[in-house]
Image (cartoon, grey):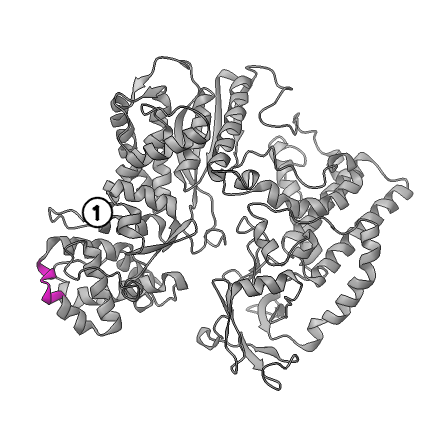
Amino acid sequence: MCLVPLLGNGPGDRSRRVGFELVTKAKQQSPGTVSGGDATCPFDDCSRLIPGDHIKAEAQVGRMGEQLYAVAFKRRVETKTKLGKRGKDKWERGYRAPRPEDEGSGAIEAALAEKLPEWEALDMVPTESVPPGHKTDEPIRYGISRWRDMFSSRQLLGHATAVKVFRQLVEDEKAAGRWSELTAAGFAYLAMSLDKMLNYNSRMSVWMSTREVIANTFNRHDFAFAWSHAEMPPLVVGDGFQWAIEQTAKCIGELVELVRPAGGVGAGPQTGFDFDQASEAQPPPAVTLTCKPGDSLDHIADASTDVVVMDPPYYDNVMYAELSDFFYVWLKRTAGYVYPELFRRQLTDKENEAVANPAKFKGEKGGKALAGRDYQQRMAAIFAEMRRVLKPDGIMTLMFTHKATGAWDALTTGLIEAGFAITASWPINTEAEGSLHIKDKSAANSTVFLVCRPRTDHGSEARYWEDVEPTVRQAVRQRIAQFQQGGIRGVDLYLSCFGPALEAFSQAWPLKRGAPRQDVEQTRRRKRQSEMFEEEYDPYAVTPEDALEVARREVKEWRLHQLTHVQRNVELDNLTSWFVLAWDAFEAPVFPYDEANRLAKVCGVDLERDVVGKLAEKKTSDLVLWDSVTRAAKGSLGLPDGRDSMMDALHHLARAARSASLGSANELLAKHSLANEPGFLVALEAVLEVLPVGKEWSGLDLPDAAAGAGADFDALEKLRRLALSEKVAEPEQLKIWQDEATAT
């Protein structure tokens, strides 16, 4: 879309608005008006920067509005068969700029103002406030103080009307004498369908341009503020409530299919709500569903269970209870109208949730560490209960994914303390490529499945870590090639290797050190934690984190060997190794600071001394890598001859090519005799394999955060072709781009 400012009588004219026009090419689009939380005034006679804090302040007093800027639609297209007869109609997606009759905001606001008092009195719309929390603080900052504020006026009118109709249908069924347990269950499913509609029709449900569909509210697993959102029409055929109900019916059918005997009556997937047919189907085998805390399964006898299948909470990745309130406040007004005993709480239980939520320890010293310890203890109690109910030869499988080593350490510690050993592990790709919570971020696509069995020698005499460490290293080395051949790369390669490392570690437990820990940083951290938790620091203690460190070192050596194709009997300097491995692992310029620090330790780099302020900057809990031009602007490029680090030389060359000319970069290369320096050639080869391929070669626009790194790739690849093609081979990743271009 192209933004068209309607200037009116100039600055100060409150009637000034912006219009929109449809464009057909990306370069015709207007530049964005929001970046990093700050905004730029869209009017040409102003264009001033509006700080994010001012925007939040305005939103908190109710002065943030919204405007319709585009309409997506489908048009029916008739087709003809080869014989000239009418074929099956097709539907095409189209877009247009909004028209005055599309808006209807005045009528919507008037209808809402008229109905809200009655709906509030009848408890048909949420009136609960959004409580402060780890994830809920974000919408509160933008003036979303009540759960119903998560919806635009149009959306709220539709959702509240649905609640009213739901309750009327319940009353109609009861008045007609048709109420039964089956009818009640049907209305519970209908309530879930209405919640499905909530998920795809809120102020956080955005338009996914890659798939041309509306994304659900929690595609990012948080309440991140959306500067533009999509609205799904509730009553259009094929969309809205019809779509939501069909989706719920499809899920029910798939669940029914899972529990029915193969090939039995009604074994096929259900396509709609047909309860009469369901009653005639072959009775399914007995399935018992219970809802109890995982650490207190008092209805299950000791050693009575063959298999436990678990998908545990992912540490601090998702605050399930905080997010669930979005649905709960509506469900208790629909499903709660049918099953009031299940919805007695005002909001969901956050205190007893097994997640690492620092909001539970707000105001306390070391809140993040306390949250991690709380998660570890809760998971240990859950695993202990699983150990109690499992038979001696039983098996437990669980899936886990998290970039942070601390999350793996907490989970594995809980497993070991409960008396389990990990006997197998497999990485499985579980994330869609278009998923918004992994897009353009250093996120993991894979989940690691762990197979665990009860330990038979629980409590035996401790072995020495120094004797077991080579076994852990060998376990990783035996699997890493297999993982890479299976297409696993980036941060997923590190996570996948955590599995075999923890297998060997857990099977050797209990462990202790023969000599006290030598890692100064970790020693200090553990001493601080011992003071916080009032427990004595033990320099001879071994934790799962030690095994993860071994895994990371093995992956480091493997990847550096893979990225340098010509063996020159020279190793990369430490800082260049870290830079290469950071891009190789995270595949993004922004990634968690803690993980960057762990990688730095493996490479012999002090992150604060050698990286921050020189090659990157720290922003909250993330580290942001700089490209060559940014480093130059910050005055942190270092020496051009690479005596301190070859990353300095490479960035000097890339900056010269980008800011001056390729000839200037070639002169700089010759001036410092870098073409004859083996260390430089290895560094160039490795860096060209990990930087994102720029638009010059890919033809694609990179995300803003990675555009500078892509420009560095383009500059260095041009220099390689000009002056170093006989010494440094063409990057393998560039060959892949060229092969794809040829195939298409």
Q: Is residue 405 above or below residue 121?
A: above
Is 60 magenta? The answer is no
Q: Mark 1 falls on what kind of element?
A: helix
Residue 269 visible from this viewpoint: no
718 relative position to 13: left or right: left
Residue at 77%, 37% in the rendered image: 339
Question: On screen, 388 above or below 81?
Answer: above
Q: Overall secondary structure of the magenta stretch?
A: helix
Find disc 1 in the rendering and name its residue. Answer: 574
Residue 194 vs 460, above or below: the answer is below
Using the image, determine if residue 717 lies above or below residue 446: below
The magenta stretch is 669-676
Left or right position of 635 against 171: left
Residue 518 in view in this figure: yes
Observer-nearest residue: 712 or 241?
A: 712
Please tell me in which quadrant of the rendered image residue 513 appears: top left
Please state the horizontal and vertical placement of residue 135, each as a whole percent of the image. Answer: 56, 48
Residue drawn at x 16%, y 46% is 571
* Amino acid at dot 1: Asn
**Which residue is the extreme one toward the bottom?**
9
Q: Nearer the viewer, residue 736 or 624?
A: 624
> Quarter of the image containing the C terminus?
bottom left
336 displayed left or right of 294:
right
User: What residue lies at 76% left-to-right and 54% top-to-bottom?
Assistant: 162
